Image (spheres, rainbow, N blue to C red):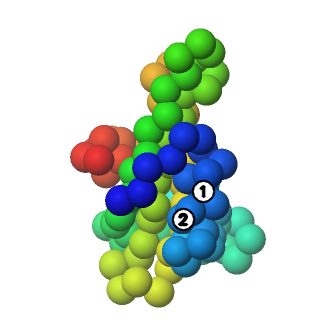
Amino acid sequence: MENYDTVVAALAGLKSRGYELDFNLAFDNIICKDNDICLNPNEFEITEVYRFEGQTNPDDEDIVYGIASFDGTIKGSLTSAYGMYADGLSTEMIQKLAHH
């Protein structure tokens, strides 16, 4: 796995390796609004994780995930704040993300 200094660099690195889609968290799934793709936790795996901690600014705390469908046909990235800035999620989605 690569090592990145910034969220932007991590996203660019993932994109260069075929993680083209931009996913967003919904309550119990991830969605790509650009092409109406929706994946439930049992339909994807997290292949890479990069954590960034804001040493001087808590707003800089973020996690970047490399996401792939189990058959490998869908690949994208997901960014998510954590700590007190984390989005409300279903228990199943929290467990999926926390496993990494």
Mark 1 lies on residue: 11
Q: 63 left or right of 97?
A: right
Question: Where does the image place residue 71, in percent across and percent down from the top left?
Answer: 36, 86
- Helix, strand or loop at mark 1: helix
Q: Residues within 10 Å of mark 1 (few under 14, many from 20)?
A: many
Location of residue 57 (image quadrant): top right
Specify the amino acid type for callout 2.
Leu
- Return the mark for residue 14: 2
Question: Where does the image place residue 66, in percent across and percent down from the top left?
Answer: 46, 61
- Helix, strand or loop at mark 2: helix
Q: Residues within 10 Å of mark 2 (few under 14, many from 20)?
A: many
In the rendered image, the residue lying farthest to the right is: 34
Location of residue 61 (image quadrant): top right
Pick the residue in front: 46 or 60: 60
- Residue 89 visible, this angle: no
Question: Does 8 appear above or below 54?
Answer: below
Residue at the spot 59% in from the left edge and 13% down from the top edge = 56
Residue at the spot 50% in from the left edge and 80% down from the top edge = 74
Q: Are marks 2 and 1 in contact (CB under 8 Å)?
A: yes
In the rendered image, the residue lying farthest to the left is: 99
Q: 99 left or right of 60?
A: left
